[in-house]
Amino acid sequence: MPDISLTTVLLLCLAAAVAGWVDAVVGGGGLLLLPALIMGLPGGMASTFALGTNKAVSIVGTSGAAVTYVRKAPIDVKIAVRIGLAALAGSTAGASFAAGISNDVLRPMIMVVLVGVGSFVIFRPQFGTAPALGPASRQRILAAIALAGLGIGFYDGLFGPGTGTFLVLALSAILHFDMVTASATAKIVNVCTNAGALAMFAYQGYVLWQLAALMAVFNLAGGMFGARTALKKGSGFVRVVLLVVVFAMVAKLAFDQWVK
């Protein structure tokens, strides 16, 4: 593990706990965790170490949240696994390209999408609050596999922050899930995207395992608590958190792009 002060390690653990809670409720924990790692690691280290270590931490919290949801939420595990397997392939491919992508090109594209997403949720107040209309059709499941699985999975391996949020929105829109069911399903899919990306980063030697193991304990606690919060508060609460996370993500990406 690189030479990091105890204060920095403690702050990273705190960020991991908060990120776990946010990620479990509505996704977007990487908005906190990845920048924290980038700032906390020594300046000479490649950013890919932050990406790889982030995956090693977040897969633990996401797995804990997924188990909590599966036990208590109305979730179709078969659909989640099918989308998750596609996401595994997508994230593995995305991670293999991560070292060659320019964040200066990627950030503006993501900001445009996020502003559109936030506006849609604001002007469609019933989005994600009504219960599912019934079993999803085969066409909708295939569309979810392609977009939420392969597409968002590729993005998660390539860049990462906001993956859970994109998954919640895609699952709500395509499969007509309410926000709680979409969050629950997204956790299973997100475990798969994290696993694919982590495997590639580990193969390339970009994971700081000792630091990741310590932060993962806090991320797991935050993730399990966040899942219980979402189940208790319901879809309306998840919708509000979703909007906060979306616009916070836009602000953070804009700061990185034009101010930093």
Image (cartoon, rainbow, N blue to C red):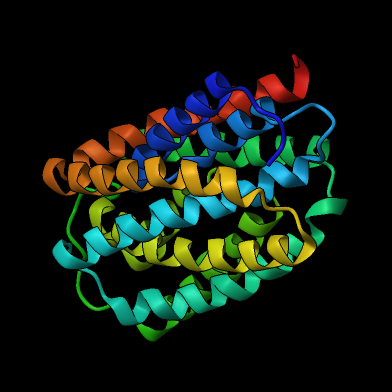
Q: Is residue 257 left or right of residue 211?
A: right
Report which quarter residue 132 is drawn in: bottom left
Report which quarter residue 2 is drawn in: top right
Asked whether 140 or 77 is in front, the reply is: 77
x and y, in percent, of residue 32 in the image = 52, 32
**Residue 28, visible in the rendered structure:** no
**Residue 64, visible in the rendered structure:** yes
Q: Is residue 231 left or right of residue 78?
A: left
Position above or below: 42 against 222: above
x and y, in percent, of residue 77 in the image = 30, 77
Q: Who's the residue at 59% across and 63% down the image?
A: 153
x and y, in percent, of residue 104 in the image = 82, 35
Q: Who's the residue at 39% across and 51% down the image?
A: 61
Q: Residue furthest top?
A: 259
Asked whether 50 or 230 is in front, the reply is: 50
Image quarter of the C terminus: top right
Asked whether 123 or 218 is in front, the reply is: 218
Image quarter of the N terminus: top right
x and y, in percent, of residue 25 in the image = 31, 44
Q: Who's the residue at 69% across and 62% down the image?
A: 202
Report which quarter residue 234 is drawn in: top left
